[in-house]
Image: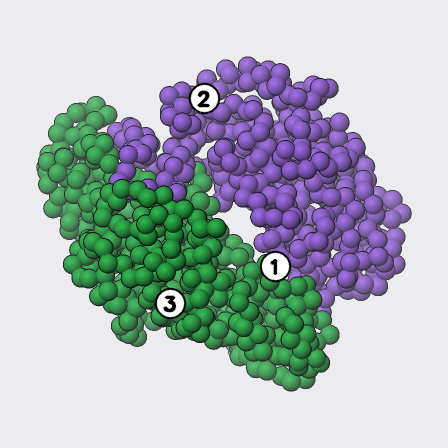
Amino acid sequence: MATALTPRTDVAGIYRPAGHLDAAIALAPYKGVWDARLAAHLLRRAGFGSSPDEAAKYGSMSVHAAVDSLIDFPSTDALPAPDDLYDPRTTLMQYLQNGMRPGMADDMTKRKIGQQVRQQERQSIISLQRWWLNRMLVTPAPLQEKMALYFHGHFTSAAIQKGVTPVMVYNQNQLFRNNALGNLRELTWQVSIDPAMMIYLDNARSDPQHPNENYARELMELFTLGVGNYSEQDVRESARAWTGWVLRPRIGTVQFVPFRHDSGSKTFLGQTGNWAGRDIVDIIFKQPASASFFANSLLNFFVYNSPEPQLVEAVANLIRKNDFNLKPVMSTLLRSNVFYSSRAYRALVKSPVEFTIGTYKALGANQVDDSAQRALLQMGQVLFYPPNVAGWPGGANWLTSQTVIARENFLASIVNSPMMDGVDWMQKLPVKAPQAAKELVATVLVGDASEQGVAQLTDYLNGAGTSALGMLSGENYPERIRGAAYLTMAMPAYQLN
Amino acid sequence: MKRSNFLAGTLSGLAVVANTQHVFAQALAQSPLPGLPGAANRCLVLINLQGGNDGLNCVVPHGDAQYYQLRPTIGVSRNDVLSINDKIGFNPTLRSFKAMYDKGMVAVVQSVGYPNPDHSHFRSTEIWQTAAPDKYEHTGWLGRYLDEANLPKDNLFNGVALAQVLPEVMVAGKTDVPAIAQINGYGLISDRNNSASMAYTKLVSDNRLPFSSPYLAHVAEIEDHAQKGSQELPKLIAGYKPAGAYPATPLGRSLALAAQIVGSNIGTRVLYVQHGSFDTHVGQKATQDRLLGEFSDAIKAFYDDLAAHGNDNRVLTMTFSEFGRRIAENASRGTDHGEASPLFLIGGGVKGGIYGAYPDLSQTNMGNLKFDTDFRSVYATVLERWLGRPSAPILQGQFATISALG
């Protein structure tokens, strides 16, 4: 049954597919009014928000030019590479050079080596997280990083678990980036034999006598098909097919070793043959459910949560038609009616990464400061450490009293940081409270506040609630503007993407 | 609306404390089940043993030769087991916990699970938390309890999750449950400035916005609760002093805070705590021994503290884990995802002992333990015989209770 979209007066010039959702109209190119507000919406979804200049710049383009510039993104090769990643073999080498004989270390020494390795790996990952956050902030290709973040939550693997090295974490991250708008089937295959994934979901520890089912199960349940589209027997058969891929610990090279492969006949999703891993991926992507699964996942991440079944199916058809190539799919989605409908506008909860990077962007900062990573931990999203194989649950789950406190306190710390001295537009706000309040709301929230909200901000700027009531002036300006910037970002709209 | 109601009635710590007796009397009067004196004063602490705790190395079937055949390297030696009877005994790291068992404070419910078990962490955790094995339910069973229990609407602490992210078990339709990782730093920096604090209160309640969003009401509510709750909670629990030291582990810290919240009589009925991860595919012994040892020491400190404050008889602790693990060990001295496993009910109100069928290692479900007690029977027992609520509406079906409580 078609889910009704309640027609509503289109207060901000956002058109929607009228009445019931017509999937064809929903995916047709949007031809309505285009302005900085919708440009900011596009940049929040296809990237990590916008600086005041960027929203205006994209708002002055056409919707197609704006989407094209995100989809046909420039090369990012010139962006800085991460600092040298720690290789645990260097620690082992040091011990060997200092006279430790291979295989002869006593327990005490082994423990010490283990501790040093873990400590340095952690430091290396922290530096890698910061590198990625900065990349999200400054990249000329925000959609590339947004897709990498999407894949990181979709094909989850966690760092420093059971022997995942920083180099493996980085390589997986690059895999996502390099396939940002590539082919989903090919990426699924690459992810399957990616060292970090092989360790995280135990294919690295599987053998024909004891096939490990962890990857076989999650590949279908969480990565490609969803529960209900395969049987327990399919999981067992797939696990057998995946045997033979061997990972050299620490070095991280992967190769197929025929004598470690179960070469017997397997029946998987109704097809019988001597299947190996690649066959499993190909058979999965022949299931109609695979395109629907990705359609639902992409809609939930980029458009809105709980999309209507007929919209999911329309996007699934689009995916099938394009043989799982993401570029034409994302290109259609990002310029569609449904993407700019009021059903989609501010209809997602910002993830902590979107919230923090968006804040730096809005303030015009060109690098993240020390508060970002601690804040992300408290908000519940640490890069390279998803909570479980299902990734971050997202939506309303991002917001608890505790995570909201972490969000607001991040804002409070950033508006009071020295970084704010370099925020040009804030130094130049009018010294008259009503105008300053209005400009703050326009710049930070593209106007998404009520008149009452602007009035409250004005009152605050004029010293309401302070013992020394006094109008906004040159003397109290820096402190009050900072406070008002915080309050603007603390408004409900700012939590929504 | 709920929000405006909340804003209209200012909630001060003193008001809550003064109200407590009235609130409890009211809840008791509304309790539909007779014969539960003090039910309204009771609290449930739910401990999630995350990752799938291996039940067979936790409550060890040391009388069963098959156990040692199937676990040649990781089986817990008969000499090490803290024997309960000739069939089973506790893992040796559970020494303090065994002493509590010997005092009659622990009920071991064996072979708990559900039909058509799911082996995925995600889905099975969801099933245990939503109590809905056959469908995707949005709310958790304790969330539905909070919605159903006629608890004072203006109390922000009817349920409290000691976690960074609100667990699904506490997701409710009508009740916001604060998730508190730790009490230090729990609060808004902007509340240190009166002017900003006042403006914040007004701005987050602004609902005349030029757009609509399915999450707008939720955002406004949580922003509001974040401010109110964090202002009130530290004051409400400040007077409580623990009777003894807790282990310096995450679980020790969580249970210390749980004792403080329970002991401060702020109307909290359900508390969620987590511990883990027990996902021991590889090298199981080191990880599980450490985690069980931490559990044992923390739960002992918790009940010692509760007892010193006279609260041990009104706090029931229940453990759960998304599944047990495969009976046979794997090639990596670990175990893969399994099915049924034991859970614990702990507290002064528990009828200590062994409940449910002993695990049968010969009649398996493709190498996994079959369940005997449906997990919803345990939930029904806790709801009816501890929290004093009819269980059928919450569990969406009638499940037999067990005799470990009441």
Q: Residue at x 28, y 74 (%)?
A: A75
Does residue B366 appear to the left or right of B157 in the view shown? right
The nearer-to-camera label among 1 and 2 is 1
Give the chain of mark 3. Answer: A
Residue at the far bottom in the pictured view: A258
For the residues bearing labels 1 and 2, Cβ distance under 8 angstroms: no
**Mark 3 neighbour class, 10 Å CA radius: few under 14, some 14 to 19, many 20 or more:** many
Q: Residue at x 51, y 42 (%)?
A: B166
Q: Which residue bears the numbered disc 3?
A: A329
Circle 2 — which element? helix
For the residues bearing labels 1 and 3, Cβ distance under 8 angstroms: no
Q: Are marks 1 and 3 on the same chain?
A: yes
In the figure, the shade used to draw chain A is green
The label number, if any, that marks residue B13 in the structure image: 2
Q: Are marks 3 and 2 on the same chain?
A: no
Q: Residue at x 44, y 51 (%)?
A: A2
